[in-house]
Image (spheres, rainbow, N blue to C red):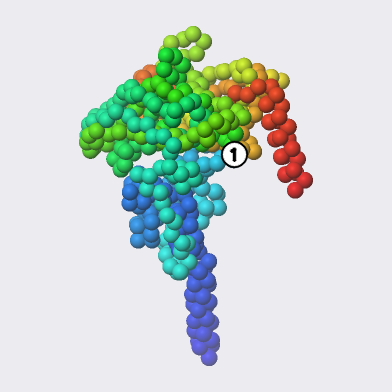
């Protein structure tokens, strides 16, 4: 009898253990219910059969072999690419592609549980992805009002950085207009892989000034100005293209880049006039030749700082650091006229492969008074700890190639007058008060 009770007790324990394991398995995240919605929202734009991601992640069969890799890259915040420090500065961005701590924990728990598929009935509805051949702003704004095109360029299969700087005639829409949005579109599909970054700048007829219609980097293809803000565009002139290509192992003959332009209606002038993205240098300031102060020793680091005083009030819409392969960090700080200091944004995990413009949400975009000092700090890492460092044995100096270095930030900025500044500050305070009362 005693032996029988022991067996019964053991058998019951096995049943309880099995039941507990089954309950745990049911509670574990599954691909269909928990992981697929995250991949759909944050990953599939690039990781689709025609995207720039190295493998599609559109269904369980495609995702399952990479479960451990996905867990590794997401837990280290390597993917999705979003290189801002989540612990300092403004944290509210219109284009935030990062994963939340909860989403990362879900993917980790799913991978560690063996990456179960779950019930396919739990899958979210399929989303319709915009083809790389289409205008990404098309759904929101319709077709562009005007399309400008570069001259063709033959991209070689293998080699170092390539530059193409053609000058192309520009004819507008018959009169001076105000630009509302612009999108930089490399050819599809191969052009998107060989164009690293570029600019389309209008030189108005008979003038020396420049109107930067569109700037591009992998991770930043379009720009929409805030409501009531636009860029004044003359009707004629020439487009100075500056295209930076990098070969990827396949020839791309006759590559042409397009830029789509969306304007405010004819005769309509927005309240604020912007310059769009403006360069704020961190290197070669105070009369020094450009980049002369960049000298990074083998297996070493360098820190550079650049300061710029605002001669009028300004609103900042976006922050886009630009360093090369040894770049590791760039911060943007505001030193206000009263001496107080605030970190506005910091890319502490910068990666030259991604040229992301971090677009502030409207309710947090910096509104800065006259006399504010914008201070930019860059950190270069020329050690073996830098995962994309091509050769830590080399001295690194200024240059256009990815293996050389640069240090500047592209800032989406609109300068305003004192009355507009007072109005903007009053509106921000009213909005904050409303939120506080709610």
Q: Is residue 108 above or below residue 333?
A: below
Residue 29 relative to residue 192: left or right: right
The answer to whether residue 108 is visible is no
Residue 215 is situated, as x and y percent measured from the top left of the image, at: 43, 30
Rendering quarter of residue 353? top left
Q: Residue placed farthest to the bottom in the image?
A: 1
- On the image, which quarter does residue 399 sit in? top left
Residue sitting nearer the eye, 299 or 410: 410
Name the residue rendered at 55%, 41% in the picture. Answer: 94
Residue furthest right in the image = 437
Residue 390 place in picture, x, y as percent: 33, 30
Label 1 Cα neighbours within 10 Å, binned few <14 / some 14-19 / many ≥20? some
The residue at 53%/35% (across/down) is 265
Q: Identify residue for label 1.
A: 361
Figure disc tally: 1
Looking at the image, residue 156 sits to the left or right of residue 282; the answer is: left
Q: Is residue 350 visible?
A: yes
Instruction: Tell me which residue sits at (23%, 30%) in the image.
Output: 154
Residue that appears at 41% across and 17% down:
205
The answer to whether 87 appears left or right of 292 in the picture is: right
Secondary-structure class at tag 1: loop
């Amino acid at each position: 009898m005693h032996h029988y009770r022991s067996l019964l007790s053991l058998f019951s324990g096995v049943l309880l253990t099995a039941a507990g394991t089954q309950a745990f398995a049911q509670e574990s995240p599954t691909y269909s219910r928990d992981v697929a919605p995250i991949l759909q929202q944050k990953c599939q734009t690039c990781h689709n059969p025609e995207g720039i991601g190295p493998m599609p992640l559109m269904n369980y069969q495609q995702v399952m072999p990479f479960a451990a890799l996905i867990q590794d890259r997401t837990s280290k915040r390597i993917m999705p690419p979003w290189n801002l420090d989540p612990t300092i500065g403004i944290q509210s961005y219109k284009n935030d592609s990062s994963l939340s701590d909860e989403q990362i924990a879900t993917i980790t728990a799913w991978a560690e549980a063996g990456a179960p598929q779950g019930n396919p009935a739990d899958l979210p509805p399929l989303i319709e992805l915009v083809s790389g051949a289409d205008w990404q702003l098309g759904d929101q704004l319709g077709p562009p009002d005007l399309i400008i095109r570069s001259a063709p360029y033959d991209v070689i299969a293998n080699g170092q950085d390539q530059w193409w700087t053609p000058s192309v005639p520009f004819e507008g829409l018959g009169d001076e207009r105000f630009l509302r949005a612009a999108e930089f579109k490399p050819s599809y599909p191969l052009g998107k892989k060989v164009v690293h970054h570029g600019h389309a700048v209008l030189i108005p007829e008979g003038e020396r000034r420049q109107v930067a219609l569109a700037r591009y980097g992998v991770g930043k293809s379009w720009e929409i100005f805030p409501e009531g803000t636009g860029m004044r565009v003359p009707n004629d002139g020439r487009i100075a293209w500056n295209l930076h290509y990098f070969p990827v192992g396949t020839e791309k003959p006759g590559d042409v880049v397009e830029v789509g332009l969306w304007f405010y209606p004819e005769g309509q002038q927005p309240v604020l006039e912007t310059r769009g993205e403006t360069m704020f240098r961190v290197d070669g300031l105070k009369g020094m030749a450009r980049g002369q102060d960049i000298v990074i020793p083998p297996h070493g680091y360098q820190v550079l700082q650049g300061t710029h005083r605002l001669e009028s009030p300004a609103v900042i819409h976006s922050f886009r650091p630009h360093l090369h392969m040894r770049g590791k960090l760039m911060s943007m700080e505001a030193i206000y006229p009263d001496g107080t200091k605030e970190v506005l944004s910091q890319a502490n995990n910068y990666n030259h492969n991604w040229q992301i413009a971090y677009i502030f949400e409207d309710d947090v975009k910096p509104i800065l008074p006259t006399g504010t000092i914008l201070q930019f700090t860059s950190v270069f890492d020329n050690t073996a700890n830098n995962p994309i460092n091509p050769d830590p044995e080399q001295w690194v100096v200024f240059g256009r190639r990815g293996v050389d270095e640069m240090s500047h930030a592209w800032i989406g900025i609109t300068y305003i007058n004192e009355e507009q500044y007072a109005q903007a500050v009053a509106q921000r305070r009213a909005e904050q008060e409303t939120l506080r009362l709610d």
